[in-house]
Image (cartoon, rainbow, N blue to C red):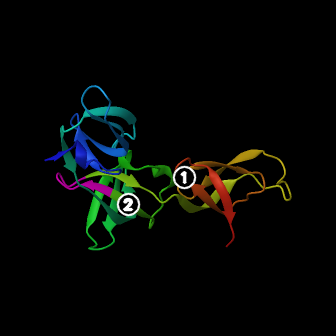
Amino acid sequence: MATTADIKNGMCIEHNKDLWTIVEFQHVKPGKGPAFVRTKIKNVKTGKVLSNTFTSGVKINIQRIEHRSYQFLYKEEDIYHFMNNEDFEQTFINESLISAPQLLKEGENVTIAYHTETESAISCEMPTYVVLEVTYTEPGEKGNTATNAFKEAKVETGAIVRVPLFINTGDKLKIDTRTGDYSERVKA
């Protein structure tokens, strides 16, 4: 078992029966009293960030997380089916583990994080940007690019995205999966 002297940024540990990654740490040796390690840890499942202090020399349980590349195949209710890009084995995970399920289209490549000890999926990260086609929006206004006005557009996955007034049905859009916002129009 490791101790607090082994802590590094990005390391995954078990703390309070949950998985946390070390965001940042600092070894502190005050003039009076025992040394300690001040850390910021992020919950792997929820993304919540906490400040935590470990007494120097305390045993920590290091956990191994593997990131594997998968391709999205199809969805059945709340279950999403994926295929491993290396061995073509299929797996399915719940919608709650996916970072932006409303923007996920068939054939899209994602990265699924697995806890190697239990061989269970922890999270599913989509690429930062996806390109989706607009299936319906009100007709666009040519030359209306100076105003900061937006309208709603439905994309091929069924998600509703706020877009500028000049976007038309059939346009391809680059969408930020972290926020779900329109980024730019993609030329065909």
Asked if the stretch drawn in magenta spans residue 30, the answer is: no
**Is 72 above or below relative to 77?**
below
Q: What residue lies at 74% left-to-right and 46% top-to-bottom?
A: 150
Q: Amino acid at mark 1?
A: Gly
Q: Amino acid at mark 2?
A: Thr
The percent coordinates of residue 163 (x first, y second) are: 69, 51
SS class, disc 2: strand
Q: Could you say which is closer to the camera, residue 168 or residue 97? A: 97
Extreme-top residue of the structure: 32
**Is 139 above or below relative to 35?**
below
Residue that numbered label 1 is attached to:
158
Which quadrant holds residue 4? top left
Extreme-front residue of the structure: 31
The percent coordinates of residue 145 (x first, y second) are: 82, 54
Q: Which residues are magenta?
A: 113-120
SS class, disc 1: loop
Q: Could you say which is closer to the camera, residue 170 or residue 182? A: 182
Residue that numbered label 2 is attached to:
111
Q: What residue lies at 37% left-to-right and 33% top-to-bottom?
A: 51
